[in-house]
Image: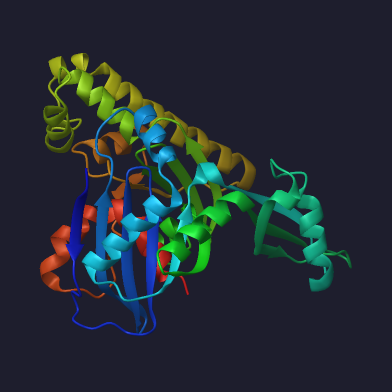
Amino acid sequence: MINLTKKIDILGLFKEHSFLGVDIGTSSIKIVQLTKHKNTYKLDTYGEIQFFDKGSKEELEEQSLKMLDDQVADLLKSIVKETGAKAKKASMAVPVFSSFSTIMEMPDLEKNELKKAIEFQARQYVPAPIDQLTLSSVIVKREDGQQGKKGKIQVLLVAIPNEVKLKYTNIASLSGLELMALEMETFPMARSILKGRKDTVLIVDIGLKSTNYCIADEGFVKLSHNYDISGASLTQAFLDFAGGDYKKAENLKKTMGLKMTPGQMEAASDIFGYINSIIIEADRIMNEFFNKNAKRVQSVVLSGGSAWMPGLLEYFQDKLNVNVSVANPFAGLVYPKELEETLKEIGPSFAIAIGLAMRK
């Protein structure tokens, strides 16, 4: 099934320096085109094309894996055409489960020595031979040395399998786009949601296939983690609660959510079981970050298609005892005022595409 949401040329003007963010997910493709505007961005156009909307998580994964590059490219070309996107330069996101990142601590070396040292140390961390990966790194923290000793640095290392890189490059080429950047999805998500905030924040992105956790601190993503419980798990639990009626299950998830009577809560034990599992994992990650960095997470942001489920924010807030909010990645962008409520509602599921389009 294809469900196309489109907004064509909503500002009535496209610029040559417009940039396209392309988020290819398990069941849909989302695109956002932005144009740099003073200290922010103008929203040119956006859209989503859904190619799977039913089934268990396992069925959705199986269906998405069967899609060939040219099939994905055809869908991408369709949404580009329907939304009227004109930008040819694009960034795409790689799922957390298809990539790897870590923080490495090492001596502060000269530039010509550092590159070799990073590649050498990376061999101890990455889960595959170096020649099968594309590595990228950035210094996220520098500490001066004491009494004539060399200082230390923290390096964020990202590794993407070459076969994954080739797949996205091929999709872009078949779609008539120029792939300017390929990022692990947590980075554009944090970019669009946090917009440069320096405090310590945990983003909980409840996606269709998995839940991704991301801790950003001092403006950098310091931790990324993938968890198997997902939006599809919740949908299946609501389906069981609704007696197998898919339409009723989707309606209950969107309108009732976690705001149930005691009797309903007892009958919906699987739903609360999955939510509690996601929260327990979030708490574990926050404690792990504190133990390693002596810093506490100051706030939690919910993202993904399930973020606006009624009662979810309050339930997270009660269990984690920390300030919790829902992601609004369109905030701060320039767009027609009449779109404000719509963009706020869809924002959590468009965070990755927006962050990709924000990438310089």
* Picture coordinates of residue 38, whole percent (x, y): 35, 85
* Picture coordinates of residue 75, whole percent (x, y): 32, 55
> Which quadrant of the view contains residue 172?
bottom left
> Which quadrant of the view contains residue 127?
top right
Q: Residue at x 77, y 44 (%)?
A: 124
Does residue 161 appear anywhere in the picture?
no
Does residue 303 appear anywhere in the picture?
yes
> Which quadrant of the view contains residue 27?
top left
Q: Is residue 88 left or right of residue 226?
A: left
* Picture coordinates of residue 107, whole percent (x, y): 81, 60
Q: Nearer the viewer, residue 321 or 22?
A: 22
Q: Residue at x 14, y 23 (%)?
A: 245
Q: Is residue 242 left or right of residue 104?
A: left
Q: Residue at x 36, y 41 (%)?
A: 207
Q: Residue furthest right?
A: 148
Q: Nearer the viewer, residue 180 or 11?
A: 180
Q: Residue at x 44, y 42 (%)?
A: 212
